Image: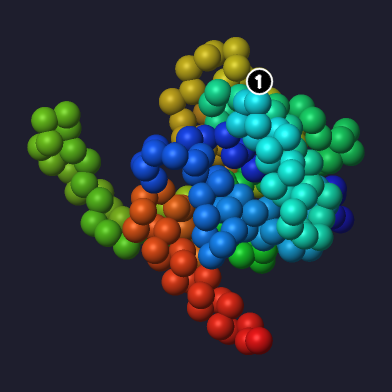
Amino acid sequence: MRGPVAAVVPAAGRGERLGPGTPKALRQLGGLPLLVHAVRSLAEARAVDLVVVAAPPGGVGEVRALLAGYESGADVRVVEGGDTRQQSVRRALESLPDHVEVVLVHDAARPLAPAELADAVAAAVNAGAEAVVPAVPVADTVKRVDDDGVVEATLDRSCLRAVQTPQGFRRDVLAAAHAAEEVSGTSGVTDDAGLVERMGATVRTVPGSEEAFKVTRPLDLVLAEAVLTRRRASRGP
């Protein structure tokens, strides 16, 4: 049985590593903001019923107007985010209708994650998983290094995975993890799955996608433009 699914997109970050100027989610890719690409991808997923975007503080009107200018094919809402990613996700969670049972959390900085990836994550949660993350094998050799730059160990990459988004959760599990983080005030984790792990819940993986890479630095934008050009060419006129 498929439960109602909502996707949350925290888009309040500044994205300094891409350089000064526009917030990362509003940077242009192929003539459209990264956020528009991310929302469209989620809206195209068969499993997703609602997309909620957490805008920068004071920027709800701007983001709402931006998204209204592009067809997405799904119910898209905008709420005010917070000063941190966790605050933004938490505020978006609190805004969801009561009947939503499954929540996907997706980074606007992964604009080319295919809709099929969201469907696979949602399907795994609906099949009984508490939390699900897309993951890809690590291609590089990974070493643990101390504060002085000295290598302490070479890690076995066969059991290492790079984790992507959208990440999927049972709503009650994700809400409990965020509530616990709000009380403790010391997160130290970089994704929602980390909060769920800290709470003791089981996080499962599904195969990720090479196209769900994160746009963090200027070179990532170059790669994203190339992928987008290839996609458009494959669709034809």
The single residue placed furthest to the right in the displayed view is 99
Quarter the C terminus occupies: bottom right
Residue 48, quarter of picture: bottom right
List x then y, in percent, for residue 165: 56, 50
The N terminus - image quarter: bottom right
Q: Position of residue 43 (x, y in %)?
A: 75, 57
Q: Position of residue 118 (x, y in %)?
A: 67, 58
Q: Residue at x 48, y 17 (%)?
A: 186
Q: Mark 1 highlights which residue?
A: 179
Measured along the vertical axis of the image, is residue 175 above or below residue 35?
above
User: Viewer-proximal residue, 39 or 149?
Assistant: 39
Percent position (x, y) of residue 49? 83, 52
Neighbor class of circle 1 (other Cα within 10 Å; few <14, some 14-19, many 20+) is: some
Above or below — where is 28 with respect to 93?
A: below
Check disc 1 and report its element: helix, strand or loop. helix
Q: Residue at x 57, y 34 (%)?
A: 12
Residue at the bottom extreme? 236
166 vs 173, left or right, is left
- Kind of residue sitting beneath label 1: Ala
Depth check, front residue: 81 or 133: 81
Q: How many marks?
A: 1
Query: In this orientation, does residue 124 appear?
Result: no
Question: Is 214 placed left or right of 171 in the picture?
Answer: left
Residue at image location 45% in from the left, 53% down from the top:
215
Q: Is residue 227 visible?
A: yes
Instruction: Give me the residue at 52% from left, 35% from top.
Output: 13
